[in-house]
Image (cartoon, rainbow, N blue to C red):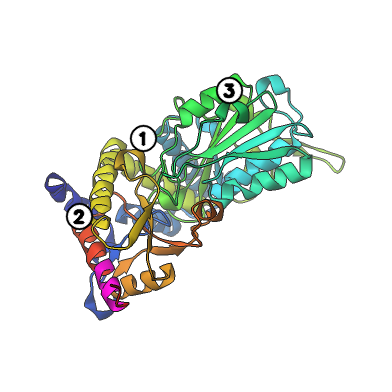
Amino acid sequence: MEGLLGELEMIRADFPILERTMVGGLPLVYLDSANTSQKPQVVIDTMVDHLERHNANVARAMHQLGAEASEAFETARDKVAAFINAPSRDEVIFTKNASEALNLVANTLAWAKGDWSDRVGALGEGDEVLITEMEHHSNIVPWQLLTERTGATLRWIGLTDSGELDLSNIDELINERTRVVSLTWVSNMLGTINPVREIADRAHAAGALVVVDASQSVPQMPVDVRECGADLLAFTGHKVVGPTGIGVLWGRREVLDQLPPFLGGGEMIETVTMERSTYAGIPHKFEAGTPPIVEAVGLGAAVEYLGHVGMAAIRDHEHAITAYALEGLATIKGLTVLGPLDASRRGGAISFELDGVHPHDVAQVLDSRGVAVRAGHHCAKPAHKRFDVQSSTRASSYLYTTPAEIDALIEALNYTRSYFKLG
């Protein structure tokens, strides 16, 4: 770990909020990056500069500012496409977050009238959608709504006691009736890294479409959409050191071309008459109305920043800091980690229980020590139910997390045990 400290100091200097002190003069120990990441100065400056010097609507205004705004917006699309190695910039659709991206897919699949030989077409009775028991609510509820509306059946892959996917009956779950397989790449609660390519290959062999929630994987590891096996992939900007209010849906062109529009309005049309409308091609077909312009510009700066740091280096750091955290947490009496205990099989989010203390109380005591974590069900209630846990405390690291911050977490948890007079 010592070899990382010099680089970590330089990286941390890019994030002004990490210099904050909290109530009582304690330094901020931010361990809630799976919830939202902090932002480097370059992202903040890029967004401010755009608002100060280039603010205008895109693809509408016939003046210099409009041209500058449009160029900045589309350049951000180019940066995102390069970051995930998309074959074409047109396959990158801007949404307001990953939840909207996943809802876009679920809704348009319900409306699609394409040829199922190309794995796109309206679902109906007898069809099946497969998800997993560890999904974020954003990758559960849209599919529940889809199957309720179409008469299709929702099925799911269960979890092992160690918090990994139970693939023992995968050949039964993925069958000739399976039309969609939608799964998270990295669990936001258990931290589990799922074998996306293996499952995608099985799904494609059965003729199913593969949707991947990459909200926790895109921030933490190199993601190549040409290699991962996804047909459609979603992630959100605020977890990749970008702003809130911007998300991404990537999809293979042949899939996106067959999906109907999600929302109607300006920019997504080719022409409109009182009788009917025709629609623009991708990506604009799915971007109705004025988009989140400055947020997209900020996201472009964010992925460019992560590219300069290097996603392989970020992955290695996340692995090392997670392993260090798991070692420290193992020393705390009465603490149980949920999910894999092998750092090589998980991402940076670590959810845990502390015997005798409610997770909200744990989080409040940690906060009094300057340590910011999350407590609750983390929008993953089914996964909590699987382990007979109502809620948990979650600490999550990122590229700016130091070993000293993990030490502060461990010290604060020991203080919590003392505070509640646990034996």
Q: Residue at x 65, y 47 (%)?
A: 142
Left of 30 or right of it: where is 162? Answer: right
Looking at the rendering, in which quadrant would you find the C terminus? bottom left
Label 3, label 1: how many angstroms apart (C-alpha)?
Answer: 23 Å
Q: Which residue has dot 1 on it?
A: 222
Left of 62 or right of it: where is 32? Answer: left
Residue 223 pos. (x, y %): 40, 34
Depth-wise, is mark 3 or mark 1 nearer the camera?
3
Q: Residue at x 22, y 66 (%)?
A: 411
| Local SS, label 2 | helix
In this view, 201 is above or below 347: above
Q: Residue at x 37, y 47 (%)?
A: 302
In this view, 278 is above or below 136: above
Q: Which residue has dot 2 on it?
A: 403
Residue 145 pos. (x, y %): 71, 47
Left of 192 or right of it: where is 111? Answer: right
Q: Residue at x 62, y 36 (%)?
A: 130
Three-letter code, disc 1: Pro
In this view, 85 is above or below 417: above
Q: Which residue has dot 3 on it?
A: 204
Extreme residue in the bottom direction:
24
